[in-house]
Amino acid sequence: MAYQALYRKWRPRTFDSVVGQKDITDTLKNAIKRGTISHAFLFAGPRGTGKTSCAKIFAKALNCTNLQDGEPCNKCANCRAADNGSMPDIIEIDAASNNGVDEIRDIRDKAKYAPTQGKYKVYIIDEVHMLSIGAFNALLKTLEEPPEHVVFILATTELQKVPATIISRTQRYNFKRISKADLEKRMKYILDQEKIKYDDKALAVIAQVADGGMRDALSILDQLLSYEKGSVNYNDALQITGFAAKENIEKILLALLNKDAGNALKETQKELRSGASSKNILDELIDMATNALMISKAGGSDESGFISDEFVQKIKDIPSTRYFHLITLANNALNDLRYTNQQQIPLEVFLVEASSNEKPVKQETVKTTSANSDSDLQAEIAALKKQVVDLTQQVANVANEPPSNSSNQVFHLDTAKSSKNKKTRAEKAENEVKPKKVVKRTKHTNEQNRKQVYHILANATKKDLETIKNVWPDLQSGLAVSERALLDVLEPVAASHDQVVMKCKYTLWFENASSDSDLMNKLTSEIEKFAKHKYDIVLVPDDDWLAVRKEFIESHKKEFLAKKKQKVSDIVQEEPEEKKEPKDDSKVIDKAKELFGDTVNIKD
């Protein structure tokens, strides 16, 4: 039989065997026992914390024919089929590779059919955040009101990418990272069952690298067993994971706290040559510095078991500011590692900087920052002063300019009233400058598209507008993240057979979008892709749309009335001849006399 990875071989088969999620598993068991099964569940949390395992156990329990206190029996035909992946009523879907609208519509169409073998038809959709917007919209109604025999279980590692409309229709369970103690306990249990010797320190290293994920821990353990099948050794764990020995990290940290840069660099170089990575060294320094701070200043205990009593005695007089300074610099160095291929350089810079006195560095930074900010502020103030002087001079010139017909006018005002009048005129001139420019530019922008808008309105149909609106939600799946914001400020308001008018929320966006031909071409092609028909886009600002439409209606009012009259006359002319022929039926004649009186004149 082919070898099976540990995380697959030891995947939990019951709720009680799930590690670190007792609150969630107890809730699911009670729901099964009491029969209060919701129609949709959302499991969210970091990778390797048991989301998919709980979903499979829950689906198996829903169809188990011999439940044991809310747990599946794992012996009946349905449980065995679920474990083998051959249960037809448990459907697992990977949303990363099935994220389109068609796949979700297929689920929606098949969900109405009754289960064939079990009591419930269960859909497990993994990585649901990968679905497109259109697929989410197709899922909404079915997710809210599915058939009684259908249960949806959605799993995701990125809850923030799931729309709020989906979250509100489900019962949400937040899976947390598994503690290092639980990870080590589970690994010890598996190794005991496999009858493999292990070193507790090696399991502690694996638990730290796994960062709360059981699958990651078992994958590293599997790799370590391949390296040395007979046992799990501490040194082998360091070699496989790229971590440094805790005893050596203790020496580096002590040198940094004592401001001994030379010794810190020397010990770090040894660990790098032994295979430790810069990132792991920084991670371990942060972890050990935090534990040392808690032990020496807050009276805590060392959960990792690596900090010795001798080390605690050496650091008891170190001030807290040294730890804060060191941890801050280490986090900055970790951030710098992401932007360089020379991984050793940020580490070495950190070691030298952390070994120095932190106060002068802070003061120099503050002085430099304040000096730069002062110079920038002074330059900005000078520029603003110059603008104020120029504007004041312009206003004064406008106020002192004599009117064109001054020779024919006589003023009988005193000095006080005259100066007051000049100020009023100056303020009016200043207030009217900017609005005039904006109005002129907006009007000019509207007139460029006015004829095109009139042409579309003259040929607009309700069917074409509905076509554009129906594909509007699907457009986001084809646009980049930076381009999707455009859809929030655009709204289709009228459409003909080959063109569409889109109202733009902001004038600035209208101008930018009108000048960006690439963006407009891409939006046009996306509309054509979903609507199966090409529509050219004509933009109009939101502020001017109502005015443009009103002008069009006023200018074409007579034409509209004429068309309506013509349509009515055409309908009258197309009436069947039998309707036109007068009826000699007595009932028809009596009804006519009842309506029109003695004025009715009957002719053959």
Image: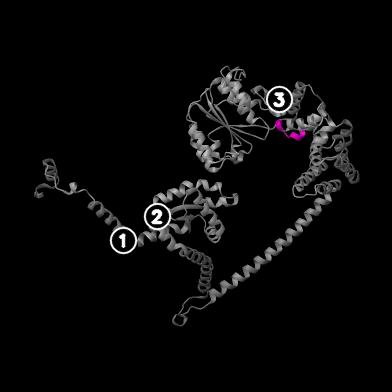
| The quarter of the displayed image where residue 306 is located | top right
Percent position of residue 228, x then y: 82, 29
Looking at the image, do the residues carrying marks 2 and 3 touch, with CB atoms under 8 Å apart?
A: no
- Residue 386 is inside the magenta segment: no
Percent position of residue 109, x then y: 48, 34
What's the amino acid at mark 3? Met
Rate crowding at label 3 as few (under 14), some (14 to 19) or many (20 or more) other CA atoms within 10 Å.
few
Q: Earlier in the sequence, mark 3 or mark 1?
A: 3
> Up-down: is 179 above or below 376?
above
Residue that carries the numbered disc 1 in the rendered image: 558
Instruction: Tell me which segment is drawn in magenta.
Output: 208-215
Label number found at residue 1: 3
Looking at the image, do the residues carrying marks 2 and 1 touch, with CB atoms under 8 Å apart?
A: no
Q: Nearer the viewer, residue 397 or 67?
A: 67
Q: Earlier in the sequence, mark 2 or mark 1?
A: 2
> Up-down: is 67 above or below 280?
above
Rate crowding at label 1 as few (under 14), some (14 to 19) or many (20 or more) other CA atoms within 10 Å.
few
Q: Secondary structure at mark 2?
A: loop
What's the amino acid at mark 1? Lys
Please, what is the dominant secondary structure of the magenta stretch?
A: helix
Residue that carries the numbered disc 2 in the rendered image: 460
Q: CA distance from mark 2 to mark 1?
A: 18 Å
Percent position of residue 498, x then y: 44, 56
Any part of residue 405 in sight: yes
Rate crowding at label 2 as few (under 14), some (14 to 19) or many (20 or more) other CA atoms within 10 Å.
many
**The N terminus lies in quadrant:** top right
What's the amino acid at mark 2? Ala
